[in-house]
Amino acid sequence: MDMPRNNFKHALARGEVQIGLWCSLCSPVATEIVSHSGFDWLLIDTEHSPNELPSVLAQLQAAQAGTASCIVRAAWNDMVLIKRILDIGAQTVLLPFVQNAEEAKRAVASTRYPPQGVRGITASGRASRYGRVKDYLRNAGSEICVLIQVETRDALARIEEIASVDGIDGVFIGPADLSASFGYYGNWSSADVQAAFEDAVKRLTKIGKPAGILTPNEEEAKKFISMGYKFVAVGADVGLLSKNADALAKRFKSGT
């Protein structure tokens, strides 16, 4: 059996814009539904969602027949968390709060087998199709995609050295945390923060590294794409459910 191909990684390397959706509902049914919606990628979150490994596994299985590649965000840049996420078959990981090049190197090392890295070895996990993929241990790194988050002013100042670490495939700008580091909580529309978003993507583009970002606002998403962002989450499953449910209830309850 051949190595599973990471379509997201290869599209990103070709410079193609990849449109995604944030998934925080921790539901295989919800993930399966949106996996057929036509998005290029889905983010299964374990940092700010009550997702644990069995739930993440179920969501990866549910999304398998859909059109979207799955990215799993680890709760932290931790080799044990990353190892377990990779072993259940995730090929792309997003790692939060990377502050410098050393932390970026540690992130990459957690996704590579020795001697290139520190990923623990199993020959029978889901990632290798339960041992059926020929030479999985030798070739796994070629299809693993490592995305790291820059989400503070300090990290932004070092973005080139962070992004230039060998094995980093893309840099995600965390809009909420970055805006908070500027002193704006829950509001990244300020001129200072918007300028930081534009500065980040320009600097990343200059060194040939794809930039990503998230926004629930469609017009802002288009703006980010025009700035040069290459992987953009244009909404979240929680927001889609809550806003549409609120709107439906309001249409029937208003004036009663």
Image: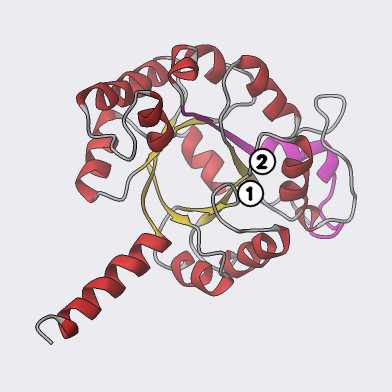
Mark sitting earlier along the chain (1/2): 1
Quadrant of the frame with the C terminus: bottom left
Please report the residue visible at 80 percent of the width from the left and 53 percent of the height from the top.
Answer: 128
Q: Is mark 1 on a helix, strand or loop?
A: loop
Residue 6 position, x and y percent, is 60, 47
Q: Give the range drawn in magenta.
A: 129-151
Residue 110 position, x and y percent, is 75, 33
Residue tagged 1: 5
Q: Are circles 1 and 2 on residues that touch, CB within 8 Å?
A: yes
**Residue 239 against residue 72 in the figure, above or below:** below
Residue tagged 2: 143
**Residue 245 against residue 19 in the figure, above or below:** below
Residue 86 position, x and y percent, is 73, 47
Name the kind of residue labelled 2 in the image. Answer: Glu
Name the kind of residue labelled 1 in the image. Answer: Arg
Please report the residue visible at 42 percent of the width from the left and 20 percent of the height from the top.
Answer: 204
Residue 15 visible: no
Q: Is mark 2 on a helix, strand or loop?
A: helix
